[in-house]
Amino acid sequence: MAEHFIDCMNAKELIISKKIRLMEGVYVFDLAMPETLPFIPGQFVVLMVAPKIFRSYSLVAINDTTMTLLIDVRVGGPASQFFEACEPGDTLQLIGKALGKFTVKESDRPKVFIATGTGLAPFVPMVKQLLDQDAQANVQLFFGSRHMKDAYCDSFFEGYIDAEKHPNFKVFNCISRPEGDMKENYYDGRVTNVIPAQLEECGSQDFYLCGNPQMVDDIQAILKEKGATDNVHTEKYG
Ligand SMILES: Cc1cc2nc3c(=O)[nH]c(=O)nc-3n(C[C@H](O)[C@H](O)[C@H](O)COP(=O)(O)OP(=O)(O)OC[C@H]3O[C@@H](n4cnc5c(N)ncnc54)[C@H](O)[C@@H]3O)c2cc1C
């Protein structure tokens, strides 16, 4: 955290310009910045949400002077309380610049992204970067939700990526407590069940895992059993 404290000299005020509820406890925020912020897809920012309370958030997008974040307030700590209560017009501080090395590694291998909850956030710009470079890129995205109504991955991505133009971009919505008939591209089970059923071997792709630390550890163990070695990249939110 020392890096963040040094950068406190460089704090910039952000103004909440939009707060959209995606599901119970999960929101998309647009934050207005005084100037644009360069970032590499996959990086995060550090925000000061209250005096001396610093938290990290993966960048979904930066559009000119607007930053977009995806935030789960159900964790319940100080940042959750701030983001649950805040309204457009409220302010917070951006500390320093975009940080982190969880970025797309250059390779010819197919890419597999795996997230639960707001671990989806960095995958929006990462997948967009890959599909902008190559519209035919082979990209699979596994997204875990408890209920079908909470599987916001498809609709969230719609704002950034036109799936119809990218035939090799495939989303697997993994539903751990399904009710009723499964829609197309919906799969019955947790990501930890769906992945071994869908992927025969895991040595020839690049994997990116993000979100809940327990989920990241569990998936990493599964991928290793199926042949993954140094081709797994992770970002833990805990
Ligand atoms: C690099 C990085 C990027 C992050 N990006 C995002 C993001 O894009 N969206 C987002 O909602 N959160 C993200 N987080 C988590 C975020 O920084 C906060 O921890 C979260 O908002 C909860 O803050 P809090 O003050 O309410 O609780 P805290 O006091 O931070 O957390 C309380 C406890 O919950 C754990 N925890 C925090 N988040 C999670 C989680 N998602 N799942 C399971 N345990 C968790 C913490 O490790 C801690 O033990 C990220 C964390 C890191 C390290």
Image: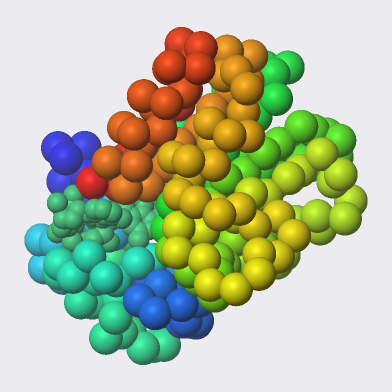
Q: Quadrant of residue 47?
A: bottom left
Residue 137 pos. (x, y %): 79, 33
Left or right: where does residue 51 sit relative to residue 45? left
Q: Nearer the viewer, residue 5 or 124?
A: 124
Q: Is residue 203 above or below residue 53?
A: above
Q: Is residue 68 above or below residue 193?
A: below
Residue lying at the far left of the rendered structure = 52
Where on the image, by quarter, is ligand 1? bottom left
Left or right: where does residue 215 sit relative to residue 176? left
Residue lying at the far front of the rendered structure = 180
Q: Nearer the viewer, residue 75 or 12?
A: 75
Residue 211 pos. (x, y %): 37, 47
Q: Is residue 97 visible?
A: no
Q: Residue at x 22, y 65 (%)?
A: 75
Q: Residue at x 39, y 79 (%)?
A: 24
Q: Nearer the viewer, residue 180 or 21?
A: 180
Chosen colour scheme: rainbow
Q: Is residue 80 visible?
A: yes
Quarter of the picture holding the N terminus: top left
Q: Is residue 108 above or below residue 237?
A: above
Left or right: where does residue 157 sit relative to residue 208? right
Q: Residue at x 71, y 36 (%)?
A: 139
Number of marks drawn: 0
Residue 206 pos. (x, y %): 58, 23
Q: Is residue 33 above or below residue 39?
A: below
Residue 68 pos. (x, y %): 51, 65
Q: Residue at x 50, y 76 (%)?
A: 22
